[in-house]
Image: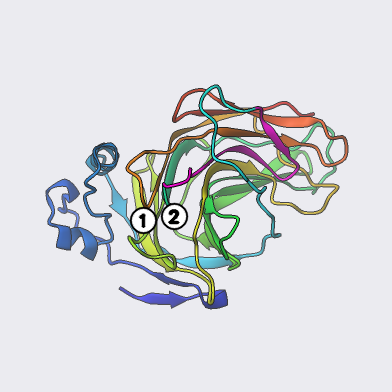
Amino acid sequence: MPTIKLGNGVTARTFTPPPQSFQPLKATRRDLLRYGFPPQPKEPPLLRLWEVALSRPLEMIQPRFRTLVEVDYKLPKTSTAPAAPPHPPPMRSNVIGGATVTAAAGQGTVRWVGGTWTIPNIYPHVGSENGVGYPFLTEVFISGKASTSSLAVGWSGLVFYSGRSIQRRHGVWWRWAPGDFTGLSNFFVDPGDTLGCVICLDLGSTVRARLSFHNLTTSQATSFIVTAPSGTELTGDTAGWLIQNGVVDFHGPFIARFGEFYIDECNAGTTDSPAILHPAQAIYLIDFDTGEDVAYTNILSDTLLQFRYVGA
């Protein structure tokens, strides 16, 4: 299990892929841990998700990492526990859209979060200049007002015109801030693929977590252990399921056109409560200059979010 040193004191520990005959649902706890599979959970809702995920075909890989050059961004502050349905009016942000949930008093800190979504095709704006790139990122995350770090995993894309053709660059990534954005150079997710992502802090730990990626379309999957940047801890009170624009500057490029897509299996959990948390606070993405809405988020059910692009 090699340990890889990254910037800011962050480390990642990877696992040797299992043999082709390996059957995770029949494996011992020791063998699951040996090959990087999450151990069988005790909570019935989590057990169902675990059984569904591991019953599908899996091609476990040992990931390779590369540092990504991205512009930093800040998440909006949340100050209150989620209200009971109906949900509160949407917030608005010029950086992100999506939905969050805040752990209520007595639930402890957010320990895990997961989501599944089909990657949309993204497009430049109508009339955009040749070579001007438009970003699009989608992610699940854990953060906290009093925390000294935050942790996110997801997929990002960039689209631009090159002459008369549309060019796209994209890939999956993770970031334990204030550490760097780190891409997975041998884990592939294309538009149209369905991606599942999970963040899970080790029990009793604020500095060590397991990150899991699963391309349900190609059956490729990976799981690895990461540690927090030096001198920081993650004591999150908020989980989220987001899109964001990978801020370049306050006048663009803005987010790529993405039409409509959904994030499903939106679940999160805390350290001190068996309750499963779901999206409660919608966030609309607005244009930097005009203040007009660019992307709506609709909370369709406890676990399902709809994102709609309504910009130019």
Q: Secondary structure at mark 2?
A: loop
8, above or below 177, in the image: below
In this orientation, which residue lies closer to the viewer: 51 or 20?
51
150, above or below 281, in the image: below
- Circle nearer the N terminus (1, 2): 2
**Left or right: 72 with respect to 253?**
left
Task: Tell me residue 270's x, y (percent).
Answer: 40, 49
User: Residue flagged by tag 2: what amino acid is it?
Assistant: Phe
Give the residue number, with chain letter if any, for mark 2.
187
In this orientation, which residue lies closer to the viewer: 8 or 53?
8
User: Residue flagged by tag 1: what amino acid is it?
Assistant: Thr
Which residues are the magenta region? 89-106
59, above or below 208, in the image: above
Residue found at x 83% / y 42%: 288
Q: Secondary structure at mark 1?
A: strand
Residue found at x 44% / y 30%: 303
Give the residue number, with chain letter if any, for mark 1.
222
